Image (spheres, grey):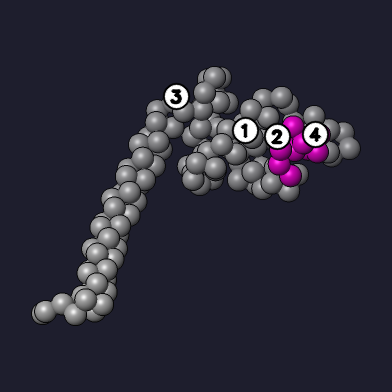
Amino acid sequence: MLIGELAEKAGTSTRTLRYYEQHGLVRAGRDANGYRQYDDAELRVVHEIRSLLAAGFGLEDIKPFVACLRAGNELGHVCPDSVEVLRRKLAEVDSYIGQLTDIRQRLRAQLNEAVEESLCLTMTCQP
């Protein structure tokens, strides 16, 4: 299929497909007149790329998943390199959750302090 057909089927743009190709994620052959030609397997690869990007993965992190699909696996996350990326990404997300939990606790404490101070001002609390 031509690049426009792949873009339409994948729900993306031709520019995006060329970008993925530049990063070694999508493969295209060339026909006699130089047009890019994609086989049906590339549609699956593009869906995998878009799914992983939506989950917060970077293009470099996606490469093992694409390689896993190209190796003939039904899923891109079943290969050891993909599993390692998943472990690393999960650790990163867990770290973010920890940081956000700390921030939430500090904000909650500041809000409680502000509410108590506000009540004291309106009720003339004793220090």
Q: Amino acid at mark 2?
A: Ala
Residue 36 visible (yes or no): no
Query: Is residue 11 shown above or below 43?
Result: below
Magenta part of the chain? 2-13
Q: Nearer the viewer, mark 1 or mark 3?
A: 1
Q: Which residue is at the front of the view, 49 or 111?
A: 111
Where residue 114 appears, x then y in whole percent?
A: 26, 71
Q: Which residue is at the front of the view, 109 or 71?
A: 109
Q: What residue sits right under mark 3 in the picture? A: 78
Q: What residue sits right under mark 4 in the picture? A: 5
Q: CA distance from mark 4 to mark 1?
A: 14 Å
Where residue 107 appears, x then y in whole percent?
A: 29, 63
Q: CA distance from mark 3 to mark 4?
A: 29 Å
Q: Earlier in the sequence, mark 4 or mark 1?
A: 4
Q: What residue sits right under mark 2 in the picture? A: 10
Does the CB distance between marks 1 and 3 fall below 8 Å? Answer: no
Q: What residue sits right under mark 1 in the picture? A: 47
Helix, strand or loop for the magenta stretch, by majority:
helix
Q: Residue furthest left?
A: 127
Does the CB distance between marks 1 and 2 fall below 8 Å? Answer: yes
Q: Earlier in the sequence, mark 3 or mark 2?
A: 2
Give me the residue at 25% from left, 58% from top.
105
Residue 101 visible (yes or no): yes
Give me the residue at 24% from left, 79% from top.
121
Q: Amino acid at mark 3?
A: Val
Query: Is residue 65 shown above or below 97?
Result: above
